[in-house]
Structure formats: structure tokens, C-alpha cells
Amino acid sequence: MYFVEDNAADAHDNQSLHGETEAPSFSWTYEEIKEVHKRWWQLRDNAVEIFLTNGRTLLLAFDNTKFRDDVYHNILTSDLPNLLEHGNITALTQLWGSSQITNFEYLTHLNKHAGRSFNDLMQYPVFPFILRDYTSETLDLQDPSIYRNLSKPIAVQSKEKEDRYVDNYRYLEEEYKKGIREDDPMPPVQPYHYGSHYSNSGTVLHFLVRMPPFTKMFLAYQDQSFDIPDRTFHSMNTTWRLSSYESMTDVKELIPEFFYLPEFLVNREGFDFGVRQNGERVNHVNLPPWARNDPRLFILIHRQALESDQVSQTLCQWIDLVFGLKQKGKAAVQAINVFHPATYFGMDVSSVEDPVQRRALETMIKTYGQTPRQLFNASHISRAGPKLTIDGELPAAMGLLVQLAFRETREQTKEIVCPSPLPWIKGLKWGEYVGSPSAPDPVVCFSQPHGERFGSLLALPTRAICGLSRKFCLMMIYSKEQGVRSMHSTDIQWSAILSWGYADNILRLKSKQSEPPINFIQCSQLHQVTSCAWVPDSCQLFTGSKCGVITAYSNRFTSTTPSEMEVESQVHLYGHTGEVTSLFVCKPYSILISVSQDGTCILWDLNRLCYVQSLTGHKSPVTAVSASETTGDIATVCDSVGGGSDLRLWTVNGDLIGHVHCREIICSVAFSNQPEGVSVNVIAGGLENGVVRLWSTWDLKPVREITFSKSSKPIISLTYSCDGHHLYTANSEGTVMAWCRRDQQRMKLPMFYSFLSSYAAG
């Protein structure tokens, strides 16, 4: 599909706003389309937003609704193998109500369904203010008094403010009833409580001013100058005080970045925002004392606050205000939740005949903000309290034996007392994964000798675990990409084992167990392959070579060739000067990490196929690497000068978070992968003495050791299963073991598939 942009009259506005001029045309394939949503653009129902499997989104605005509808229909009637069914909000609400998706995920989906988009500053996703305490040294997330009142709009968090907004509404109501007078330049509008809005382009740019490309957009919005220093976003506490109490015109809610992106709180570029009246220079955002001046910790704690039991049980009231019943009509008047009429859908600009008034209205729409589309007409359900599912009476139909079994297990699970991930914050949740300090101890639930050393273990979204020989790579295509977690099961459409290391330097494929491998790619003799990585949904294959060159192959699944895979194009990536020893793909963040014997470790962009940056400062070559599916954080291991290993943790943007020395050699690393906000994930390290050590991803403090007295051989690979309930390890002798929580020994084990060197022989 190709989109070629018109030279619209207001194109120069858009370009100045977006900083860099976007390419006026682009294309994508049918296979890449994951979701298609109708969108409004500047309160006109004329746009469509397309979500691609590589994580990119395109917002396309057309001249009118009919044209858009034709395009939308044309796209959806094409053959789109990866399209997700996304229209069912009821199913989403049920998943949220039963705690199968987090508050963060649910709000993200609601924003998407209500027409909010990261591509439109006027309809940017909106998230609630959660906390009211930005001044304490310590925090208890179980204490209701630290939270904002989610049943009331942000501007009326205190009783005395309510009367002023109600008076304002009454005055405007009387003016409106008087009707239009001849000499009025602007006719009176329907009454409202707030003349400003909780989300608009000014708000978004106010928060994101430190981060390019938003800095450029902010300057375009503000006549090429930054705001007055005292008005610039400089302190969490000040922002809260203004929104919730001190200002009659500031009614900002938050944006999603407050729950996942520490970078926007830091003035990394060194912009000069000036000096405030009190003599303080505006630089990084001032954080609450309980964040210990660490933006990353602030975001991690804030995300846990969003997932706290208190918020989980009252969030439905905020959803009523923003997306639901109390958004408009009588309910909105009673809830003190009515905004300027220009912010609501259905404000038809084209019906205004007077050109001056129409221009004024268009400007209002561009700057005031837009209320999200209403998603619910009845009160939103509240979420069941924590863990009520088993505590409630079991249905009689379940039979007495089952009930007895439940009772028996229930008595044993006593509350495990464990230290908090951060001593000064109470109520943080460690999570449910095996090895979690708040979960019962891990026990071995599976052990299998193979007599040959594996190269790697791989967890699949189908719940299976694969053990791969040293020169093997698993290639696969899933029939449906996972949409909402736990909403879609994932099936494998096609899979094959790719093998390398042959004298003729050919990569071979074996997709059918009964048939010998077939030739797939003849690699250049200059590029002797030493490592491979596969990206499932974009069908990309990366090979690393002895001379340091990485080759990226773009492939297409086809039934016409014997290999069922054909190479469409290849690109060489240059950055290393020595042998590439390891390639690691982190799909959710679209990055490839490559490691070389020359001591370098490089991040590459999977979408643009280009260099991003190097992780520097390793004293010796990196021996193990992994990345978190949930945060994009990267763990690297290298040998330490005095023996043992150094473990470093980096952000996806290449900032060093911290490092820790380990007396033993760390042979392998992997991250646990439980949802952020309801867990503090760990880095699991497989040590040379057969022990697995877990470190907190928050501050690299050791969390626990998992030991098995009968085995002291080095753990050369390890991985968590996709649901986090099992931890698989492979040692240097080829023994694979799985660990689970003591209370989950009856759980069904994932299937384990082994592909040893003999598999590619014939």
C-alpha cells in the first residue's frame, strides 16, 4: 500500500510543528497491518490510523468522511493475515475486571478506542494524576491518604474549589439563556465549568519540552522561545498543586510517559530554560523526596502506585469522568465535569458561515483540547478486590473433592514476609514469578540429561521451551501476533531450524523432521557466519561474522520455493572489527544487540536497519547479554580484572543504570518478564558453580540464590517461560532443569523440545 501526501494548504503549519519534514510518501505491506482505527482530526471525522507489526503507526487525514470511509473499507477488505480483532471493549473490560490485564494496559487500550493517538498532540492519550503526596521522604502505597480522589475531576480535589466552578457554570448558564444580542461579536456558548481542558497540545508539549523532537514543536508553538521559567514544567509537586488546587485555569491530567519514560524528566540536551524568580535555574524536573532524586525510580514507583489496590478499586470512577457516563449531559453537570463546548465531538466547524467566527472556532479546536470519544453509557464496573477469586465460596457444582483440594492448598499459603524492594517505600509488589521474594521457594520440577551441550534455551509464546544446539537458530512465524495479553492464543504457522558453520559457508534450513536440511543462503566467503538471530513477525534474519560484519536479510514466507522462505533484500551493518560472538533481539523495543570479541557492544534499530549506539566501558569483551521485554533494559556481563564477572544494567537508550561485581563467573543472563507495575522483575544469572543468582532490576541488589545441591556445573543458558511460572536452566553437560514455585508443582509443565547437532545431520 502506498500513501502519497497532497500539498495541502496548511502543510507548512504541520511541518514547522513536526520539526523535521516527514517524507511525503511511504508504503507498507498488507502483512504488516495489525490494526486499523477510524480517527478524528481537529474534531472532523476524516482520518484513519494504521498500526503496523513493527511497532510503527501512521495517522492519515483525508479531505472528508466519505473519502476516509472508502479508504478504510478498501483496507479492511484486503487480505490482512495479521489483523487483530480489536473492536470488543466488553472483553477488554472483563479482562481488566478479573485482573488479567493491568491498569496501565487497560488505560492504554481505552485511550486507543476513544481516538487518542501518540500521532496527534491534540488527542494525546490521557492518564490520571494518581498521587497527592510529592513531599514525603517515605511512601506507603497501602495508605489511602497519599492518593488523589479519582471520583472527582482534577480541579476539584478540595471542597472549596467546587463552589467557584459551580458559580462559574451558573453565571454562563444565565448568559446563555438571555440569548444572542445584536451587538455581540461572539454569541454566548453553552455553559461550562472549565474554560481550559485536561489534555491539549499545550499540555503535552509543556510536559515533554526537554525531549526532542517535542522541544522543536514547543518552540514552534511558543514563537521560538521557551516559556517563562516559573511556568516551565520544573517540579512534580508544583504541577500537582496547580492542577489540583492553586490555579483556576490549570486543570492538567497526566500523559502516559509519567508511567514508563524517565528520560522526559531529564534535561539531557542541556537546554537553557532560564532562572526562576527564587533564583533556581530550571534544569531537570524536581522529583519528590521519596524518589531519591532518581527519575527512573520515580517512574518505577509511580507505575506501582498506578497498579495499587487503592487505585485498582477506584479507577472506574475516573473512567466514568473521562471516557464514560459522567463525560457529558446531566451527569457531567452534577460531577462538575463540563468543558468548553468546542472540546466535544459533534462541534461542526463547516456549519459556521461567518468566516471570522469559523477561523476563531478552528483556532479554539486546535488549542483548547478535545474530549475523548465516549466509550461507556453506564457506570463502569469496579475491579474485584485483590485475590478474591479463590477466597470466595467455590461454586457447588465444582464437586466436593475439588473444594477440599482448594481448601487444603489455601491453608498452606501463608503471607510470606519479605523485605520491600526499596526500604523507604512500603507496599511495592515483587510479583508472581518463580524466585520472587514474595512467592514460595523455587523447587526443581523437571530434569533431563541430554549428553550434549546446548547453545541456548528459548521460551516461546506458545508456552513451549526449546533447547538449541550451538550452531542452530530457530526460525518461526506466528499465525497471529499477540494483541492484548491473554486475549489471543498464539499458534505457529511455520518453523524451521537454521544451521550454520559448514565448510561451504551455506546457511541450511530444516523445516520438516523427516527430510534433510536444504540450502537456504550462500554466504560470502569473506563473511564466515559465527552467530544468527531471527525476528519472527518481520521475517528478518541477522547473521554475525568472523570479520565483524553483520548482515540483515529481509525474507518473505512463500509456498513456491522448497525452503518456503525467500530472501528479498540484504543490508550489511558495519560497527565491529572483531568476531561477532552473540546477537540478541528485543522485539518489543525493535532493537538488535550485537557483541564482538573486539570488546564492543552495539544497539541497532530493527526498523531502520541502522546503528543506534554503543554500550561502552566494558573492561573486556562482553560474554553474555540479554534485554527485558517489559522495559527494554539491557544486561551485559564481562570478565572482571581480578576474577569473577561484572554485571552492568543499561536503559534501552544506552544510559548505564548501575553495575555490580560478582565473585563467581556469570555464564548466562536472562530477565524475568512479569508486567511492570505489579512486579519488580529480576535479572537471573547462571553462575559457573551451578547456582542461579537473582538481582533486582531496580537497583541490582541481590534478591535470592537458587541452588541445587546435586549439580555444580556451569549454567550456560537460562530462560523464564513466557508466563514467568517456570525457570529453565541448561548446564555445560547438557542437563536441562526447570524450577517452579513450591505452591505450583501441580501446574502443567511447558513442553520442552530439544534440537541437538544430530538434528541437522539428516
Image (tube, helix red, strand yellow):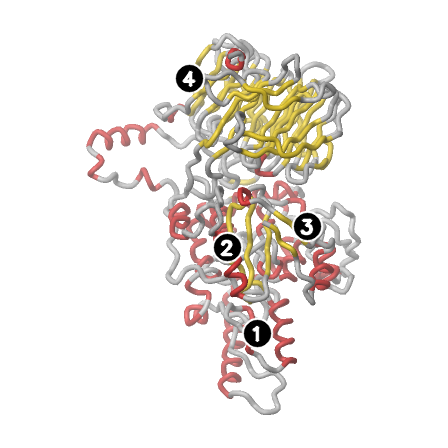
- Crowding around mark 3 (Cα neighbors within 10 Å: few <14, some 14 to 19, many 20+) is some
Amino acid type for the residue under numbered disc 2: Asn
Residue receiving disc 3:
286
Residue receiving disc 4:
446
Are the two marked residues, 3 and 1, in contact with CB atoms closer than 8 angstroms? no
- Label disc, if present, on residue 747 of the rendered structure: none
Q: Nearer the viewer, residue 186 or 473?
A: 473
What is the distance, in whole Å, between disc 2 and disc 4 at their CAs? 51 Å
Where is 749 relative to 653, above or below?
Answer: above
Query: Which of pointers 3 and 1 lies earlier in the amino acid sequence?
Result: 3
Amino acid type for the residue under numbered disc 1: Val
Amino acid type for the residue under numbered disc 3: Asn
Residue drawn at point x = 69 percent, y = 66 percent = 10
Tell which tag, 3 or 1, sits nearer the viewer: 1
What is the distance, in whole Å, between disc 4 and disc 3 at their CAs? 50 Å
Residue receiving disc 2:
74
- Crowding around mark 4 (Cα neighbors within 10 Å: few <14, some 14 to 19, many 20+) is some
Q: Secondary structure at mark 1?
A: helix
Query: Which of pointers 4 and 3 lies earlier in the amino acid sequence?
Result: 3
What is the distance, in whole Å, between disc 2 and disc 3 at their CAs? 50 Å
